[in-house]
Image (cartoon, rainbow, N blue to C red):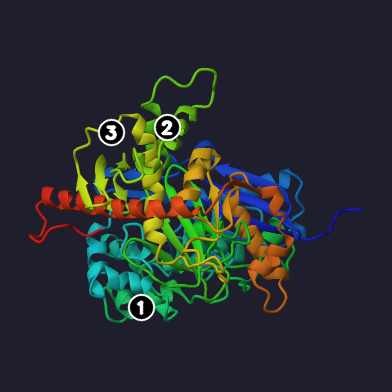
Amino acid sequence: MADSSPLYLGFDLSTQQLKGIAVTSDLKVSYEAVFDFDADASGFNIKKGVLTNEAEREVYAPVAMWLQAIDTVLQRLKDKGIEFSRVMGISGAGQQHGSVYWSQEGEHALSNLNKDKTLESQLDHAFSYPYSPNWQDASTQEQCDLFDRHLGDETQLAMNTGSKAHHRFTGPQILRFRTKHPEEYRKTSRISLVSSFLASIFLGKIAPIDISDVCGMNLWDIQAGTYNEKLLALAAGTADTNDLRSKLGNVPEDGGGSFGTVSPYFVHRFGFNSSCTIVPFTGDNPSTILALPLRPLDAMVSLGTSTTFLMSTPHYKPDPAVHFFNHPTTAGLYMFMLCYKNGGLAREQVRDSLSPQLPGTSDPWSLFNNHATGTLPMGATSPNSPLRIALYFPRPEIVPNVRAGTYRYIYDPEYKNLSSNTKTWNLPTDDCRAIVESQLLSLRLRSRNIVAPPSPNPDNLPAQPRRIFLVGGGSQNPAIAKLAGEILGGVEGVYRLDVGGNACALGSAYKAVWAVERKSGETFEELIGERWREEEFVKKVADGYQKERYKVYEKGVEALEKVEREVLYKQAVDVGKAGTSGAGQV
Ligand code: XUL
């Protein structure tokens, strides 16, 4: 007998591909399909999924390419045998911050699609501008300066919207778009984020922006739960914010609510069930924390080309170095995020400076790992000796805002003295430990205000994450896992989360399951927690909190803070901006 049990679809519209994944009610992956922009798209001159205008530091993607991707991914799922009539809910995720500009005809075109034609062939007039500014875009320095000043300073902006101004954030992008393309802006009926653009296609009308993804705009007052009037006025260029407000639309609070049912186009073209629910689509980072029933104070450390640290927390404590978003499913919780530019690439450079590899091993990391864990913390030669501490930024970093370079120091914790005399460093071997330590110390420094001691706390443990989940390429490395436990702690240990390359699309599919099948008041964590088979996806890879080591690394946090101040100060002096009073600000 044909299987008629429900399926749920999750999509991930990322920088380089669109992925679709179908799961059953008990969270088993049953179908997946991918459209890789560079390999599969035709008619767009893109590279790594985007177009660039280096002169203005612009990075953007053609919206029509995403339509082509949706057409094809659905066809590929169908070719694999999926019965779309079983799909009871669809959700998805988009790269954060990107914006899509709909024309006056956009909504009408969306709701009047001809089932015999592709999306790409019939939505060409649905946009007032054919491109979507991408999160890698860096063209908005001028606009960011205005945003940072507009509520007083960057700290005020971070308090209000969860982040200081960033080039990629949608508010500064809209401000630039309006001034650079006034005619296109005037002709824009609605503005979507990448996530709500994708939801709109499936819904057949313009979908609201998601409660978590809206926090990536520098426009949303997180505590008030509304757009900030002053920031809207700045982006709109007028005190009358009604026009921009209606371009952006309302933002429903429930991340598991229903936007309505799937557009008839998909019913008639692909055989979707006409009662299939469209669930809010969110940003890729919020969706990634939904790939497991992450509890408050569990942390995810994504160790890819760059490093991202994600945590669900009940505490709202923003500052200019971090990001806060509303949690995508649970009102009253927040998602805390650190987003670095440097990570895996920097570690690889240090690894490649070592030669030759250990005889008899094919693991390119074995020598690096031996050096990284073969000495006392921070290269000390005895428990009280000076410490080796350094920053490794092959690319300009944003956390903190420092130029590309390698910055090595010696720190004497007794006299709290920093010295740039690094004659005692053994190079390149000392770099192995120092690079992993500095990356993890930066996470500890910047998350220390939002972690809390376990509760109850009979052993009087210090504030730290509960469990640490490592994901991405670097999560395979045992030396990194060991140091992560020593430096970040983790009351219950350090784990590797292995869901293949699918965490983000999977998180969206789980969100659809929860939204459609939840009982009244049942949280995402409760429903998914009950159905998730942890043993399939999670493996303990290192101890977490170790009292002595955790304490020693307090000195490391102190040292890293000083190093960052020193490097920033020197940078400010170099560009002639330093004050006369001493250290610069981190
Ligand atoms: C987060 C960010 C990226 C994008 C693309 O602030 O800019 O992680 O979401 O993945």
Is label 1 in contact with label 2 (beta carbons under 8 Å)?
A: no
Q: Quadrant of the C terminus?
A: bottom left
Residue placed most toward the observer, 388 or 47: 388
Q: Earlier in the sequence, mark 1 or mark 2?
A: 1
Which class describes the residues within 10 Å of circle 1: few (<14), some (14-19), or many (20+)? some
Question: Mark 1 and mark 2: span between their CA atoms?
Answer: 50 Å
Residue placed most toward the observer, 297 or 171: 297
Task: Determine whether the beta carbon of the residue marked 2 sits less than 8 angstroms from the nearest atom of ligand 1.
Answer: no
Mark count: 3
Q: Name the residue: 25% across, 63% down.
A: 143
- Whether residue 15 is visible: no
Residue named by callout 2: 371
Q: Name the element at disc 3.
A: loop
Question: Mark 1 and mark 3: span between their CA atoms?
Answer: 51 Å
Q: Is residue 396 left or right of residue 501?
A: left
Q: Name the residue: 44% across, 60% down.
A: 337
Q: Name the element at disc 1.
A: loop
Identified by mark 1, the residue type is Asn
- Whether residue 244 is visible: yes
Point out residue 342 in the picture as x, y percentages from the top left corner. 37, 44
Q: Earlier in the sequence, mark 1 or mark 3?
A: 1
Is label 3 in contact with label 2 (beta carbons under 8 Å)?
A: no
Question: Mark 3 and mark 2: span between their CA atoms?
Answer: 13 Å
Identified by mark 2, the residue type is His
Residue placed most toward the observer, 233 or 288: 288
Marks 1, 3: nearer the viewer: 3
Residue placed most toward the observer, 128 or 533: 533
Residue named by callout 1: 228
Identified by mark 3, the residue type is Trp
Residue named by callout 3: 425
